Image (cartoon, rainbow, N blue to C red):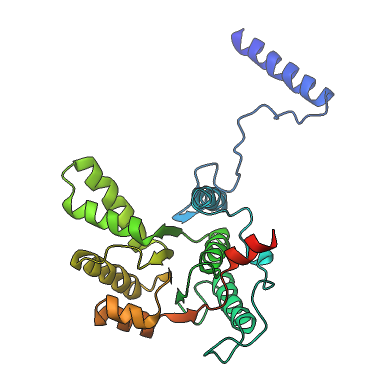
Amino acid sequence: MIRDKNLDLQREKAELLTANGYPADALDDAPACPRCGDTGWVGASMCSCLKELCTQEQIAELSKLLDLGEQSFDTFSLDYYSPLPFPGESLTPRENMEFIFDVCSSYARRFGKFYFRNLFLTGAPGLGKTFLSACIARTVSEKGFSVVYDTAVNIFARFEEQKFARDRQEVGEARDETRRYLGCDLLILDDLGSELTTPFVQSALYTLINARLTADKGTVISSNLTMDQVRARYTPQIASRLEGEYRVLPFYGEDIRLLRKQRL
């Protein structure tokens, strides 16, 4: 009797749904992703639905540090870079930035397949290094790769916390962060040279650079230091790896931030 009543109710529900233009099973618990049944995995492989969710979460996390709403290769402008000769350089600032833009955009769009695995963006403040770093972060994230963006000061502080902190929770959190720095597909280390360069920081930087090179992981470093200043500030082993394993892109020209302010 109860079974018959249940069947009658199911038929009535189906009739009401179809009468109102809905499928008979519209209220059934159908999975949002039929490919994986909402588990996020197809066998041992991550399903495309979970990859998309991870990408969205990663972009949201990056947006806390970067203005990803405006910073993209499509919005990058060469208008602020002078077409006139620049002292001591064979290319004008605009010609130089055209080349740098092509390298950075190709690096991001062909990430993992581009000729250069690592980039070193060097030059004075206000020339677009952070903007292009954000463009790279956005594009590579949208392709589904894991991206970590952080400043040199924060990164080395985490390495110090992992080694010297006494609180177990702080040590655990720092260890998780340093693992992310070492293991992500792309690490963007912003403002190298702003940190206090102690012997420990020298050691941590060498470990970070060498471990990522050994693991064949991509790294983008930006710095206000010239390569001569890098050689003077860091150990020969660090300078050698930055010059030998990274494509060095020197920025020069007038401060874009000041030019924009003057035109307001």
Q: Residue 95: x percent and y percent? A: 63, 84
The residue lying toward the viewer, choosing from 46 and 136, is 136
Residue 228 is at least partly visible in this image = yes
Q: Is residue 99 above or below residue 201?
A: below
Question: Residue 101: x percent and y percent?
Answer: 60, 75
- As drawn, the residue found furthest toward the front would be 262
Q: How many marks?
A: 0
Q: Which quadrant, please, contains the C terminus?
A: bottom right
Compared across the picture, whether 51 is left or right of 223 comes to: right
Residue 238 placement (x, y as % from top left): 29, 77
Q: Residue shown at 29%/70% (left/top)?
A: 211
Which residue is painted at 75% across and 16% down in the image? 12
Q: Where 41 sits versus 227, above or below? A: above
Q: Position of residue 141 (x, y in %)?
A: 53, 59
Is residue 220 visible in the rendered structure shown here?
Answer: no
In which quarter of the view is residue 5 placed? top right
Q: Residue at coordinates 45% horizontally, 81% vertically from top-left?
A: 248
- Who is closer to the viewer here, 213 or 128? 128
Residue closer to the observer: 49 or 66: 66
